[in-house]
Image (cartoon, grey):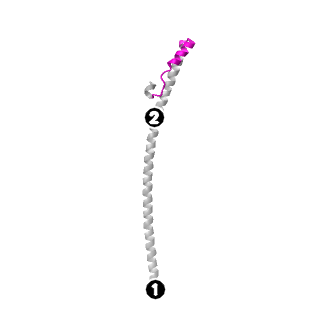
Amino acid sequence: MSSVLDPFYPSPPHHICLLLKAQSGNERSYAVVNHRWWSMEKINSQLYLENCYILQQNEKLRRKAQQLNQENQALLNELQSKLSSSKGQNNNEDHGSTSSSSKSDVVNSSNNR
């Protein structure tokens, strides 16, 4: 079961179970050790699958964050270009009004003479 999920899982430790059986001579201790090992293996498999799911979700969130960042950068660039163009128009209007007022000042000063 676990070897299908991950090639790094060890095969069942038959040599350990057999060694415990030979030392204790008790069939029950062999079954308990084997049951505990399979219980741990089942928990490990469940945790492995849960970790895989979390990694997939993290990858989806990372891609979404990259997409949102790109959209934010595009909107920021658009805003900056609009602001710079509006500043340019305001400067042109300011220069135009200044130049027209300076012309009127010249006309007024010549009329005052």
* Picture coordinates of residue 19, whole percent (x, y): 54, 16
Residue 103, picture quadrant: bottom left
* Residue at (44, 48) in percent of width and height: 68
* Picture coordinates of residue 2, whole percent (x, y): 46, 25
Disc 1 crowd, CA 10 A, few/some/many (<14, 14-19, 20+): few
Residue type pointed to by label 1: Ser
* Picture coordinates of residue 23, whole percent (x, y): 57, 13
Magenta residues span: 6-27
Element at label 1: helix
In depth, the one of 7 and 45 nearer the eye is 7
Residue type pointed to by label 2: Tyr
Say if the magenta span includes residue 43: no
Q: Give the foreground label among 2 and 1.
A: 2
* Residue at (43, 40) in percent of width and height: 60
In which quadrant is the N terminus drawn?
A: top left
Say if the magenta span includes residue 14: yes
* Picture coordinates of residue 32, whole percent (x, y): 53, 17
Residue wearing tag 2 = 53
* Residue at (44, 28) in percent of width and height: 5
Measured along the vertical axis of the image, is residue 20 above or below residue 43? Answer: above
Element at label 2: helix
Measured along the vertical axis of the image, is residue 1 above or below residue 52? Answer: above
Q: Earlier in the sequence, mark 2 or mark 1?
A: 2
Q: Residue furthest right?
A: 24
Check residue 110 in the rendering and tell me which mark sits there, or answer none. Answer: 1
Measured along the vertical axis of the image, is residue 82 above or below residue 112? Answer: above
Check residue 40 in the rendering and tell me which mark sits there, or answer none. Answer: none
Residue 24, picture quadrant: top right
